[in-house]
Image (spheres, rainbow, N blue to C red):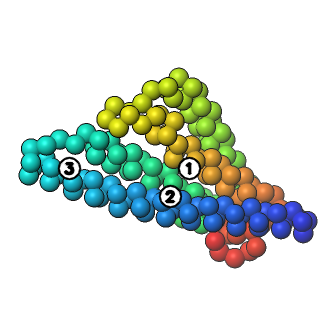
């Protein structure tokens, strides 16, 4: 990889890392919100015989959103689930080929998922959630953001591999 290309990959990795860290902070806040809402629902239902459908819907949204918002940070740090028994037994070129295939697969998965979400939201986007009246565009936004950033992480990792780097390390060579 040329020096300029390597610098660009390192810059892209740094930007993705910062964005992913910000999204992780939002995910932690959503986890706290979800815990508070679940306790509130239990107290309201058992203590006051009162149902809170909006709290149930918001807790569900928080749970799903925190998964998608945490996904990019796990990927950029190579802390996501990985099955690496076979690549560990293989050496050099075979390991690199498997890494390229894996990253390309993640990128294609993200592209297909985003295409499907776009097709779905073109129809369902005009509807709102039942309890809070939240637009489906907003309800599914964390999934779109998370999958988009996962695809960008896979692309940066592919560029790193193409330049002779290792996908589970930062483009600068150190651990992520």
Disc marking residue 100: none
Q: Specify the farthest residue to the bottom.
A: 174
- Give yes or no for contact between labels 1 and 2 (Cβ–Cβ under 8 Å): yes
Name the residue located 87 percent from the left edge and 62 percent from the top edge.
5
Q: Quadrant of residue 165?
A: bottom right
Q: Are marks 3 and 1 in contact (CB under 8 Å)?
A: no
Q: Residue at x 51, y 47 (%)?
A: 142
Going 58% across and 37% down the picture, which residue do you hit? 113
* For marks 1 and 2 on the same chain, the one whose residue lies earlier in the sequence: 2
Q: Which residue is mark 3?
A: 41
Q: Is residue 115 above or below residue 31?
A: above
Separation of marks 2 and 3 at Cα, in angstroms: 25 Å
Specify the quadrant of the image occupied by residue 35: bottom left
| Number of residues whose C-alpha sits closer than 10 Å to that of mark 1, classed few (under 14), some (14–19) or many (20 or more) | many
Any mark on residue 70, and which?
Answer: 2
Residue 45: where, in percent of width, then height? 13, 46
Residue 100 screen position, x and y as percent: 72, 53
Q: Residues within 10 Å of mark 2 (few under 14, many from 20)?
A: many
Can you tell which of label 3 and label 1 is closer to the viewer? 3
Secondary structure beneath label 3: helix
Residue 34 visible from this viewpoint: yes
Earlier along the polypeptide chain: callout 3 or callout 1? 3
Q: Looking at this view, is 51 or 103 the one in front?
A: 51
* Residue 171 position within the rendered picture, expressed as x and y whole percent measured from the top left: 75, 68
Residue 91 visible from this viewpoint: no
- Residue, disc 1: 146
Quadrant in the rendering for residue 16: bottom right
Inter-mark Cα distance, 1 to 2: 8 Å
Establish if 16 lies above or below 147.
below
For the N terminus, the quadrant is bottom right
Q: Mark 3 and mark 2 in contact (Cβ < 8 Å)?
A: no
138 relative position to 119: left or right: left
């Amino acid at each position: 990889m040329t020096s300029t290309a390597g610098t660009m990959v390192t810059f892209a990795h740094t930007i993705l890392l910062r964005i992913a860290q910000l999204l992780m902070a939002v995910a932690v806040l959503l986890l706290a919100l979800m815990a508070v809402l679940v306790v509130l629902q239990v107290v309201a239902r058992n203590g006051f015989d009162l149902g809170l459908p909006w709290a149930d819907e918001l807790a569900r949204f928080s749970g799903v959103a925190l998964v998608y918002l945490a996904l990019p940070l796990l990927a950029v740090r190579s802390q996501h689930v990985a099955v690496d028994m076979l690549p560990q037994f293989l050496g050099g070129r075979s390991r690199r080929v498997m890494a390229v295939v894996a990253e390309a697969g993640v990128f294609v998965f993200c592209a297909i998922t985003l295409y499907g979400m776009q097709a779905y939201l073109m129809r369902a986007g005009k509807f709102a959630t039942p309890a809070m009246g939240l637009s489906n565009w907003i309800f599914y936004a964390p999934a779109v953001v998370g999958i988009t950033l996962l695809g960008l992480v896979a692309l940066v990792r592919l560029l790193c591999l193409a330049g002779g780097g290792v996908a589970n390390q930062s483009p600068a060579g150190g651990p992520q």
